[in-house]
Image (cartoon, rainbow, N blue to C red):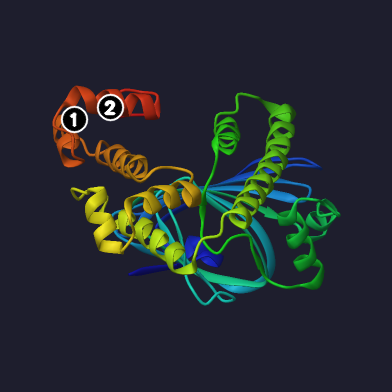
Amino acid sequence: MDKINTANWADYFGEAEANVLHVSDRYTETVFQFKEPSLASGKIHAVATPGMVLTELSLQSNKPVQLIDSEPKESAESVFILEGNVESRFSYLTQPLHFSSRNHNIQYSTSFAGSHIINSGNFQALTITYDIAYLNSLLQSSENTTLEKLGKNVNRRENYLATPHSVNWDGQIAEVIQSVRQSKFQGPTHYIFIESKMMELFVLQMEHLHTLQLTSMKEKWRKEDQEKIFAVKEYLDRAYLHPLTMKDLTYEFGLNEFKLKKGYKHFFNTTVFAYILHLRMLKAKALLSDPQMTISEVAQFIGYNNTGSFSYEFKKRFGYSPSHRGR
């Protein structure tokens, strides 16, 4: 597996170009584009504000790639996975974290270092990195237990992970992310807008995690059942193109149908088959970038016998017809 040390991106790519798009007393915007046919291509787009940096990483590869953060440093960041799957291992955690599309989490580490295995295909992630002093100013006494716990850990310099498993974001978070990526503002207004949306994402993330924590306190799940439900998700991340039935899943993982449905909705804020459809549609979107594949072939590949039904679902999900391959 190819490895990329994130401290030296340019060393791995034959084509690499960094551009500063904006610099002022308050805001900086940069973009770094890279390409190596045998490795990967993509870009890193960053907007820095006082106290926060918003970074969007886009990576395309035909094979798994490992990103390595090798320089330990005190760090706090929110992560939102837009597309693709990644397995992250951090020096302060004994178990890997698995993220897939529409997952999020927040962490603080006194010595952040780790590695990230990105599966083949398209990968996009949005992160907000917080200046520690600035984060401390936000984490005042609060009835939000997630904020309070994060604040205590930062003050004590103790590692913090909001939830041991990544969780699906809710509709409000999705709307803010979309507004950030589709901003029509220009000049100073654009950067003021981005800064406000970063703060909004932080608040919504904290509230979402707080709500999940309260729900978990009210509705206790046995550790064994939690592990089985998360094992189902990890299995679906690999086998989503297989013919799957609820009966097969319950038998394979030793859960009854009611518990699997309820648990999946509880932990991931979606249903089993809605998640399978989500993964299949992302696969279809990636396949459509290949001009050698017809829409009918793509539809059949992900399990649709009717091209019209596939096209309808694709347009409803992505906002454009699969025939518009250039988008």
In the foreground, 11 or 322: 322
From this viewpoint, is residue 32 visible?
Answer: no
Q: Which mark is residue 49?
A: none
Location of residue 104 with respect to 90 vertically, above or below: above
Task: Count neighbours of disc 2 (C-alpha within 10 A) and say few if under 14, some if 14 to 19, many if 20 or more.
Answer: many
In the foreground, 85 or 191: 85
Asked if residue 294 lies left or right of residue 79, the reply is left
Q: Secondary structure at mark 1?
A: helix
Q: Which residue does the image show at 36% across and 23% down from the upper left?
A: 320
Q: Are marks 2 and 1 in contact (CB under 8 Å)?
A: yes
Q: Which residue does the image show at 81% across and 54% down from the upper left?
A: 139
Name which of mark 2 and mark 1 comes first in the sequence. Answer: 1
- Indicate the amino acid at tag 1: Ile
Residue beneath disc 1 = 295
- Residue 131 drawn at (x, y percent): 75, 57
**Viewport quadrant of the N terminus:** bottom left
Residue at mark 2 to residue at mark 1: CA–CA distance: 7 Å
Q: Secondary structure at mark 2?
A: loop
Residue beneath disc 2 = 322
- Residue 181 drawn at (x, y percent): 55, 34
Quadrant in which residue 296 is drawn: top left
Quadrant in which residue 302 is drawn: top left
Location of residue 302 with respect to 164 vertically, above or below: above
Asked if residue 71 lies left or right of residue 74, the reply is left
**Viewport quadrant of the C terminus:** top left
Q: Which residue does the image show at 82% across and 59% down from the upper left?
A: 133
Task: Count neighbours of disc 1 (C-alpha within 10 A) and say few if under 14, some if 14 to 19, many if 20 or more.
Answer: many
From this viewpoint, is residue 71 visible?
Answer: yes
- Indicate the amino acid at tag 2: Pro
Location of residue 240 with respect to 172 vertically, above or below: below
- Residue 325 drawn at (x, y percent): 29, 29
